[in-house]
Image (cartoon, grey):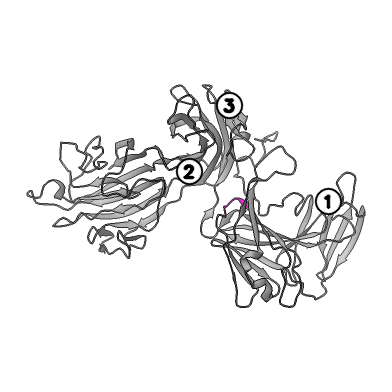
Amino acid sequence: NHYMNPDGPFDTRPVTQPVLWLPQNEIANSPSNPVRLTQGPFAGQLVFGDVTYGGLQRAYLEKINGEYQGAVFRHTQGLEAGVSRISLGPDGAIYTGGIGAGGNWGQAGKLNYGLQKLTPNGGNAFDILAMRSVQGGFEVEYTQPLSAATAQDLATKYRATQWRYVPTADYGGPKVDEERLTVASATLSTDRRKVTLSIPGLRTGRVVHLHSPRPFTAENGQALWSTEAWYTLNSTVGTGSAATEYEAEVAGLSGGAAVNTDHTGYSGTGFVDGYWNQGAATTFSVDAAAAGQHNVGLRYSNGPNPVAGAKTLSLYVDGAKVRQVRLPSTGNWDTWSSWTEVVALNAGRNTVAYRFDAGDGGNVNLDKLSVVPVTRIPLFDGTNLDAWEARSGGAATWPVSGGSMETLGGDIRTRQQFGDVKLHVEWFEPQYPPEVTGQARGNSGIFLQERYEIQVLDSFGDTTLAADEAGAIYSKKAPDSNAATAPRTWQTYDITFRAARFDSAGAKVDDARVTVVWNGVVVHNNVAVNGGTGDNIPEGPTPGAIRLQDHGDAGENPRFRNIWVEPLT
């Protein structure tokens, strides 16, 4: 919420993530300029000094999903003064200059001035050459082969932690959500110079600290020169950029909304309460790299006071009310959950606000907001069934022709499992003779999480709405109207699905909810589904597949095409 006077030229541009975080007093304090090495084993990497921390640090950078990120290592200490500036000579030497001052503008125990030349001597110190992000972990490359002693029980030779940073008024940037990670496995390459680490639980938007305590030696007996690395994990291989997170306690607060810390489990330095006051509002200033649909995920707590159950707030974007948002119960005030809404954002700066309006329930606490562009996952584009498998396991075998697939050969389901989603499906009913009636007329279904079926059937012209006709939440609720088109025409379902919510003990605290738009007509609007609809797996907190039904009736079969899903995460 900083503004320049007059308005600065960058206010409307999205915030970009740092290429490198430099943790305060661990690897830096007041860094100097970086220079890019052009010779030697570290050619292409950066080195930079530090006025207060001193010495030189080295950075290895790589591009992941089109953006730079990387790791920083200690390179050398023992210089005569804290480093104010460095430059690279034509001979490849590094020149360091120090001009100290009062306070902490100098390195403790060193001179207030210095000018030194560091020249490569041709030696081969045993050091970390590079640290790269790979799927599920990191690849760490060394300048020399590892010794047999180090290679034995290699995973035990590493310690890993991760944390993130949020804007605060505290000097030095306190770590937020710090947690220790387990190195599940470490695989050594055949040349013994690369180690691939599998580290479950890595999260994007974090700094990952990797430590190899001594003894950690090379084949020639040399000890590892620098035993630590700090990797800025903005995104991981194949996943795209991380969601941008905004803490509620540093958002704009009004109407009685205030920061508090009297419950546990929040992120950052606190959470926002005060939503017992009508008019309370939290306004986040958020950035979008491009205009379009975005998932905005609110992390909140909804305890039993003053009443138990779901409560509501009003969602605003750029000052305009979008809709009322329903937030399921979290059981108590120390448990947090997330609720995602899809909203349109403009490129650059936007505001997203949650306000306790007349007609809302209020009485919730807010922790943070995540913003990420909507990602569409194609499930069937008319060419193959790679995203599907048979319900019983193995390959899906439905016939594919003419850009669509025929419901023949048993139910199929997605290989990927989903939670909250927006799902688009197009379906086609053949022309059946008059003697084929009722549930035999092109019966199929779309199962959400393999638990809740949206019925597919030829119901054209049927004037009796029922819970087993097309558009129905099968066995639970008939559609509000019959929006069917004639046989031999393509029809569409656009389904917004919210999975059931469960507490930490596994008890359901909120039913699944479904909105169905059938051929452009809303036939279910945020309808609660109080259990499985038949032929379903049990309800539970785990994600589930999307299943398409082959009912097995005689005659020509229904067909599906153009299926995609947008996770609401």
Foreground of the two, 359 or 269: 269
Tell me where residue 240 appears, x and y as whole percent.
52, 55
Lower position in the chain sequence, tag 3 or tag 2: 3
Describe residue 285's horizontal placement relative to residue 363 as left or right. Answer: right
Location of the N terminus (image quadrant) = top right
Describe residue 98's horizontal placement relative to residue 289 as left or right. Answer: right
Q: Residue at x 72, y 52 (%)?
A: 22
Q: How many angstroms separate mark 3 from mark 2 (CA)? A: 24 Å
- Amino acid under label 2? Asn
- Classify 377 as above or below 364: below
**1 and 2 marks in contact (CB < 8 Å):** no
Tell me where residue 558 appears, x and y as whole percent.
21, 54
| Residue of label 1 | 52
Tell me where residue 555 appears, x and y as whole percent.
13, 57
- Amino acid under label 3? Ala
Identify the secondary structure beneath mark 2. strand
- Magenta-tinted stretch: 202-206
| Residue of label 3 | 257
